[in-house]
Image (cartoon, grey):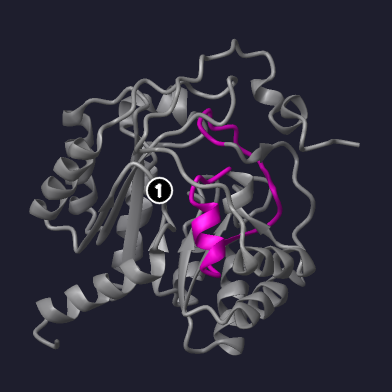
Amino acid sequence: MRDLKLPDQRHPEKAHRPDNAQPKKPSWIRVRAPGGKAYAETHKIMREHKLATVCEEAACPNAGECWSAGHATMMIMGEICTRGCTFCNVATGKPDALDAFEPGRVADAVAKLKLNHVVITSVDRDDVDDGGAEHFAQTIRAIRHRSPSTTIEILTPDFLKCAPEALEVVVAAKPDVFNHNLETVPGLYPTVRPGARYFHSLRLLQRVKELDPSMFTKSGIMVGLGEDRQGVLQVMDDMRAADIDFLTIGQYLQPTPKHHAVARFVTPDEFKDYEKAAYGKGFGMVSATPLTRSSYHAGNDFEKLRAARMEKLGQS
């Protein structure tokens, strides 16, 4: 029986990689340990509904803060990914079959948590013909039925091995925000995201806008992987060419010695500089801090993004 708590069984594709030293985190990276009544209640609801969260699976540093506020990013389609990205702490291997009852359990958890905004993400499911597109759509519809006032943000895989219609299925379900992360600069894809293709991911987000121009699109990258400033600025230009509305930039943190090494810790001042540059390039919303993650403060940021669009359209 596979034990996902053991690193060699959680990441078999990384077991024989040489160890990378894990540098000491600077003061601006450190966070408090999770705890408190609201944190415990969120944890209880997730376990009762047999739901996985990317907060736990990806060892997010903000889990304590978000769960204490009753926010969690739910990860559908299991906890085992068919990809083996070198930065990611989600387990790799052959997943179980999709659970037809999961969309209903997710919707029930959203209702019990009384969420104003929910983020739904997933593992990559290259073993499924549509990459899990219909499962995403069913989950969106189930949440809409149970909690019609909740805004829904999805963080999807790239659907690289699927027919183009897979994306159309997800967009037709009308999430409020469609997020897919580019993760890093194109030059680092072979070592950081070897199973993905930079321009495919970029084109995916561009197609979302072509299918539904009113839908907000979002993408994010990590820094500290070995990229340079010019590479980050070029990614911003590529995103704006694809009409992406919302950019997130956060510091890469190495989950284990077997994962991709941290090249350096980017300073808070550099993040502020990236934020200023991104707004200058026309993004409607930017979150760029060392602890920024795709779904960190997602609800508040969505409200700001929606307000910015209304103001731009003269409807404030």
Asked if residue 137 lies left or right of residue 102, the reply is left
Q: Amino acid at mark 1?
A: Asn
The C terminus appears in which quarter of the rendering? bottom left
Please state which of residues 113 and 77 is positioned toward the viewer in this rendering.
113
The question of residue 72 being in magenta is answered with yes
Asked if residue 6 lies left or right of residue 144, the reply is right
Q: Find residue 61 and report its horizontal and vertical position in percent.
A: 50, 45
Please state which of residues 305 and 25 is positioned toward the viewer in this rendering.
25
Residue at 47 percent of width and 80 percent of height: 116
The N terminus appears in which quarter of the rendering? top right
Q: Is residue 260 positioned above or below 233 on the image?
A: above
In the image, the segment drawn in magenta is 59-88
Q: Is residue 128 positioned above or below 120 on the image?
A: above
Q: Most extreme residue toward the right, as rendered?
A: 1
Residue position for label 1: 181
Please state which of residues 193 and 171 is positioned toward the viewer in this rendering.
193
Label 1 element class: loop
Q: Find residue 18 and report its horizontal and vertical position in percent.
A: 59, 10
Residue at 39 percent of width and 62 percent of height: 297
Residue at 54 percent of width and 32 percent of height: 85
- Could you classify mark 1 by the number of other residues whose Cα lies within 10 Å: few (under 14), some (14-19), or many (20 or more)? many
- On the image, which quarter does residue 182 sit in? top left
Q: Is residue 203 visible?
A: yes
Q: Find residue 104 and report its horizontal and vertical position in percent.
A: 71, 77
The question of residue 265 being in magenta is answered with no
